[in-house]
């Protein structure tokens, strides 16, 4: 009986995946969780198609209420990539969102993995859209994701290496840093000038004491109390990976 139930469960899961795959086929944006309005979905689809044509890649964004039973977001994203977005000439990438478990996951094939790496690349993309997702600004988050993919691919095509946000030089930040350093240096110099005095220090320490002003006749140390303050350490947001020999990517919670 248990074997029959297991077989039936497997068949139901397979049919569910097949049904979702049919619904997702050749559609850049599949919003099963209904996070976008019709106009937002159409505008996002048009943007994705432009980026796909410019870089000869495939990009997918899929939202759902709940993941299939027992399947992780990474495994599901890899399956969706293989079944519906694997025909990108120069790579494929898909972003999956599961509202029930608050999971997000980006899956890439090996061609895209070379351009958007699992560590630096996925983390860089995450920083572009994760705050939007957490705040419920799903349209902005998805558009920032597509803009990030476009930027990373353009950089790779120009420089021949994956884009690393940490190596990007920010002229505005450099100017601000110079101004802050100059202001700090001027303020410190002004403080030193104002603190200058023509009063010379004494040769001996005893010269600083006023004789007969204090008469200490008893010395005693007395313990009063100890104050202990405990602070709970903040936990970093969880992350996950279903990378294998055929897939890159990464994900977490929003």
Image (spheres, rainbow, N blue to C red):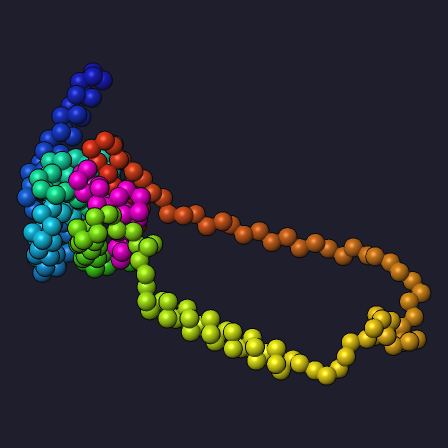
Indicate whether residue 183 is drawn in magenta: no
Q: Residue at position x 87%, y 77% from top?
A: 210
Out of 11 and 103, give the one closest to the viewer. 103
Residue 223 at what x, y percent from top left?
Answer: 78, 55
| 226 versus 15 height, above or below | below
Res 162 visible: yes
The quarter of the displayed image where residue 127 is located: bottom left
Q: Foreground: 53 or 250?
A: 53
Q: Which SS type dominates the magenta stretch?
A: helix
Please name the residue shown 17% across and 18% down the image. Answer: 4
Q: Is residue 95 left or right of residue 224?
A: left
- Where 228 falls versus 182 (above or below)? above
Give the image location of residue 155, x and y in percent: 21, 53
The x and y percentages for residue 7 are: 17, 21
Does residue 71 appear in this view? no
Residue 72 location, quadrant = top left
Label tally? 0
Q: Residue at x 54, y 52 (%)?
A: 231
Locate the N terminus and report the quarter of the image it occupies: top left
Q: Look at 13% across and 47% down and name the residue there.
A: 59
Q: Nearer the viewer, residue 148 or 132?
A: 148
Dividing the picture into quadrants, the one containing residue 69 is: top left
* 27 left or right of 105 in image: left
106 vs 135: above or below: above
Q: Is residue 123 magenta?
A: yes
Please provide the residue range marked out in magenta: 106-132
Residue 245: give x, y in percent of width and height.
23, 31
Report the side of 81 relative to 204 (left or right). Answer: left
């Amino acid at each position: 009986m248990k074997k029959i139930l297991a077989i039936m469960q497997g068949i139901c899961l397979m049919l569910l995946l097949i049904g979702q795959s049919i619904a997702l086929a050749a559609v850049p944006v599949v919003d099963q969780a209904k996070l976008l309005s019709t106009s937002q979905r159409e505008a996002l689809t048009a943007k994705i198609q432009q980026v796909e044509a410019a870089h000869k890649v495939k990009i997918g964004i899929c939202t759902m209420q709940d993941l299939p039973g027992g399947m992780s977001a990474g495994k599901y994203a890899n399956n969706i990539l293989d079944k519906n977005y694997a025909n990108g000439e120069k790579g494929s990438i898909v972003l999956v969102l599961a509202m029930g478990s608050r999971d997000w996951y980006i899956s890439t094939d090996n061609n895209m993995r070379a351009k958007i790496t699992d560590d630096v690349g996925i983390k860089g993309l995450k920083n572009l859209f994760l705050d939007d997702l957490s705040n419920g600004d799903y349209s902005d988050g998805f558009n920032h994701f597509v803009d990030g993919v476009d930027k990373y691919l353009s950089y790779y095509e120009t420089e021949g290496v994956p884009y690393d946000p940490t190596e990007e030089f920010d002229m505005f930040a450099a100017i601000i840093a110079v101004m802050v350093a100059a202001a700090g240096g001027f303020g410190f110099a002004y403080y030193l000038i104002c603190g200058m005095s023509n009063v010379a220090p004494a040769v001996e320490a005893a010269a600083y004491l006023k004789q007969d002003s204090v008469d200490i006749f008893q010395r005693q140390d007395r313990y009063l109390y100890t104050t202990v303050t405990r602070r709970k350490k903040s936990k970093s947001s969880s992350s996950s990976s279903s990378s294998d020999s055929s897939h890159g990517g990464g994900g977490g919670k929003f």
